[in-house]
Image: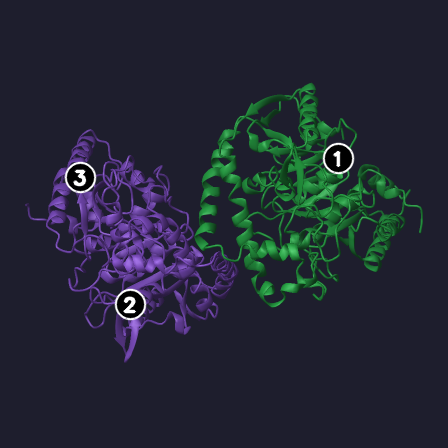
Chain colours: A green, B purple
Amino acid sequence: MTTPTHPTMPLRELTMALRSRELSVVEHITDVLDRLAADNHNAVIALDTDAALAAAAQLDAELARGRWRGPLHGVALGVKDLFDVAGLRTTAGSAVLAGAPPADADAAVVARLRGAGAIPVAKLHTHEFAYGPTGDVAATGPARNPHDPSRITGGSSSGSAAAIAAGHLPLALGTDTGASVRTPAALCGVVGLKPTYGALPTDGVFPLSETFDHVGLLAADVHGASVAWDVLARPDGTGGGIQAPGVDGVRIGLLLDDYWKALDPALDEAVTAAARRLEARGARVVELRTPMIDELAATYGPIVGAEAHATHARWLAERPGDYQDFTRQRLLLQADMPAGVYVEALRTRRRLVPRLRAAVDGVDALLLPTTRLRATPIGQREVEVGGAAVPVAASLLALTLPFNQTGWPAVSVPGRVADGGLPAGVQVVGVRLEERGVLRVAGAITGS
Amino acid sequence: MTTPTHPTMPLRELTMALRSRELSVVEHITDVLDRLAADNHNAVIALDTDAALAAAAQLDAELARGRWRGPLHGVALGVKDLFDVAGLRTTAGSAVLAGAPPADADAAVVARLRGAGAIPVAKLHTHEFAYGPTGDVAATGPARNPHDPSRITGGSSSGSAAAIAAGHLPLALGTDTGASVRTPAALCGVVGLKPTYGALPTDGVFPLSETFDHVGLLAADVHGASVAWDVLARPDGTGGGIQAPGVDGVRIGLLLDDYWKALDPALDEAVTAAARRLEARGARVVELRTPMIDELAATYGPIVGAEAHATHARWLAERPGDYQDFTRQRLLLQADMPAGVYVEALRTRRRLVPRLRAAVDGVDALLLPTTRLRATPIGQREVEVGGAAVPVAASLLALTLPFNQTGWPAVSVPGRVADGGLPAGVQVVGVRLEERGVLRVAGAITGS
């Protein structure tokens, strides 16, 4: 095993090192594979060693001929094991799919990134079938948080967040149906972007809920996320380029309703610090109320539950023992839902999203905690806060799921943690801003 | 009562007579109101006499000042009692809404037509809550077919079709969730247009199924339907104008699968006659197969059923006796549908519509019967065909509902009836053609 140093380079430096051939693609990919092979956070499901090294050699040869595909040329890519990668099995973290045949083709976004020169190196841990925000329920056991291996990574893109936080990888794909890119990013102290609903194709991704599924990405810093977003959003290579650094005059909304409050004061403090930083850079911060949020948020569970159960109904009947107990129990809770409950949830959501939009119409973006709790101990379903038992999963979903319901772009970035403890995610949500605008605000918060 | 003559004028002549002031708007509206008051097809729910006469006087005054709003200036409009008309109660043909307050505002399409000079004169009969294609289930009793008052009009836009067929009215609004504009048009021998899904707003229309509800219109001839479509589609008055009359080179598909066959040979004969007429005018007729149609069509019932039941669940529990027995029974059949059945129906539809589109991709339009049966006796739920009992409702839905599932534009026009008996509807469906193209083909069939 070589001494792994390169992957911890920020993507900007990695791109320059690869392009200048100071670092060869084969060296970079070898380092990443070595790191992933030695990973002790249970982040990895499978390595794609031979294909990755072959691609690395080819991309080195292209550089030798003067061909450079762009900023992801030769960059290692981790892929949540919910996406198809040609030649590898998609297991979705479940024994149900342990015997699935290898995928024939890449998922659409994998193909885009591969075409831009990124090299898929590994399938990464996911909460079983992406149906949970903790990352500790999977056929291969729990993922472990690099900041404290006794704690969860958050999920469901658990391996993606852990591998980046551990410095193994510069970039990973995830999915986000209610939390699943932003929450693990927050709990592991990395950057996670959920783009606008429908902005990236979900072809070749195992579905959780067609109403709310988004493809997203995770990176070590905002710059890395921005580079990957530009490639994914514009696979023809047009557009993109340097983003304007300023947030002068940008209107930022803070949400005052009880719903939006964190349970861990470090999270609200991180938001306050981020708001001050944005104000210092010329943003205007205003306070808003969203009185419909509890009713809107309550439609999330029935919609995801009905859609997930419909996907799994046959396997649940035929092979119940292949599911993790917790996943099977959660899915079976949905089995008896009447169609009317689902129809009414869809209707309530359609009715209330425009009212939420109207309530925040005066701002460009919202600033709030990503989660109500920081990383909790693995396997623990409730924690005590102020003498009361608080459910972990709900606390890791509540502040992110509304933006799967609205479909607005949202990014989680590491906030300032005054107590020096576990990472605290700060979420920037685009109301009038698109992905690049959201990332610009995020960059102003982190200084990256 | 004056001798009613004017409403039976084709819309083209009516427009000219009104514009030239040869016929005043007040005379026309008075005639129509007299006819509707004397109607013996149970087509009318309520007249809007005072408002209609006031509007007529105003539109006469505008003409006297030289202002002409366009081809619907002063034209009487019938409105299915599923649409809001300001000042009138919307009962949806049900005792459930018999005590509803008058509507505050016009439905969006009523407002558009009113702004273009049309005058809503009456709320017209609808199958109760539009949940049925026969038109003989309503709080006010069955609508009666002007061609044989012992027979159904078809539904759910029963009063709209009957009033036009009786010559009471030149134009009426209907809705079409699976059949409800085209089927009554077919059974009553008038023209019914279901535009592309979403082309006309459903605001102010009592919903049946948000997935499939379309606003449509009925008129005595294709020219009348075309004029009304132009006004509805372009409320700003731009575009429209004279349509090209030809169908030279247009590719017309006939569907060969058993699913698409009528049960009454007069209907298939009417389609054959229409195809010959189109060929004589230069169209090219090809034969196609759609092997996925049975599976696709089977998703219609669960989707409409779940959505309709969700709308009515509370009233069904609180006021079951206010529904007609048949409607209540049909709705209650949906009460126990699991959410998964509905989710899977939506998924199957999403999967198969592109396959249907691919199967017919080589043609501009499809030509087929509108219904499998012609008008059946009122109250009869099954008829005998070739020794077998055939369900009436399914036979009046089967050939129209696939185009609510695809959302493609479709029009029913009266076909040639070789036996001189009841009307037989011929349906033209746009694959590559939009509404105006479909109407152009329809006009080539009817010669109007």
- Residue bearing the label numbered 3: B20
Residue A90 vs residue B120, the one in the foreground: A90
**What secondary structure is marked by label 2?**
helix
Position of residue B413 in the picture relative to residue B430 (left or right): left
- Is label 3 on the same chain as label 1? no
Whether residue A72 is visible here, answered yes or no, is no
Cβ atoms under marks 3 and 1 closer than 8 Å = no
Mark count: 3
Dot 3 crowding, Cα within 10 Å, few <14, some 14–19, many 20+: few
- Mark earlier in primary sequence (3, 2): 3
- Is label 2 on the same chain as label 1? no
Question: From mark 3 to mark 1, how far is it between C-alphas?
Answer: 79 Å
Q: Position of residue A378 (x, y in %)?
A: 73, 46
Whether residue B376 is visible here, answered yes or no, is yes
| Rendered-image quadrant of the C terminus of chain B | bottom left
- Residue bearing the label numbered 2: B392
Q: Position of residue A236 (x, y in %)?
A: 68, 46
Above or below for A31 versus A351: below
Residue B29, numbered label: none
Q: Position of residue B216 (x, y in %)?
A: 32, 50
Above or below for B445 versus A133: below
